[in-house]
Amino acid sequence: MVTLFFIIDPIAAVPIYMTITERFNEQDRRMIRRKASLIALGLLSFVAVSGSRFFALFNITLPAFQIAGGILLLNIGMAQLNAVRRRVQPAEEGESLHRDDISVFPLATPLLAGPGAISTVILLATRTESVLRLGELIAAIATCMFGAFLTLRAGKYLQKILGTTGLNLLSRLMGILLTAVAVQFIINGIKEVLPLFKT
């Protein structure tokens, strides 16, 4: 749950959320963030359930995905440390300013359920050895999305209290932990691959 929350990083999404919802009233904002959180929850839960089938479909081994996913997360973490992480491109952000429904895009994906979150859920899903463990993973996803919903709801207060500098500082702290998680994924993948070269 902690790993997922760092990767989703709703704090970094607050400035973008405030910008693209500026033209909406509070009632519309409430509906948008609720719908976006539920859509992101559904997407990540679907990925968690179908994770193993994804590997079988493309004939991908777990170590290969661990290393690839670790590199992807490392890239995201490094960008987060340098405060240059962009999950929504400027053109996409500008387009969203004219959309009537921004809950699916760009809020649900890629802001809440982006490539990093999807990759992490797939990696975690491969470690679920029973239905109970899978249920725990989905519960962790639901908890993270509820936390993201609450963070977005408090967005205007966070921006007022912390300012841009404070939000960037929190995002960089999350980036440090995300980078460590990414390196661990890569190490796990390499450890599982090395015995294959000895045979």
Image (tube, rainbow, N blue to C red):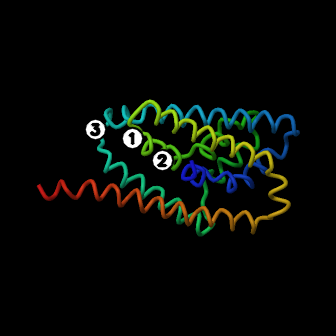
Query: CA–CA distance between discs 2 and 3?
Result: 19 Å
The answer to which of marks 3 and 1 sits earlier in the sequence is: 3
Q: Give the secondary structure at mark 1.
A: loop
Crowding at dot 3, Cα within 10 Å, few <14 / some 14-19 / many 20+, comes out as few
The quarter of the rendered structure image containing the C terminus is bottom left
Crowding at dot 2, Cα within 10 Å, few <14 / some 14-19 / many 20+, comes out as many
Query: CA–CA distance between discs 2 and 1?
Result: 10 Å
* Contact check, label 3 and label 1, Cβ < 8 Å: no
Q: Which residue is mark 1?
A: 126
- Extreme left residue here? 199
The answer to which of marks 2 and 1 sits earlier in the sequence is: 2
Amino acid at circle 3 = Asn
Q: Which residue is mark 2?
A: 120
Q: Residue at image x 47%, y 36%? A: 48
Q: Give the secondary structure at mark 2.
A: helix
- Tag on residue 59? 3
Amino acid at circle 1 = Thr
Left or right of residue 160, residue 150 in this image: left
Q: Give the secondary structure at mark 3.
A: loop
Query: CA–CA distance between discs 3 and 1?
Result: 14 Å
Left or right of residue 144, residue 187 in this image: left
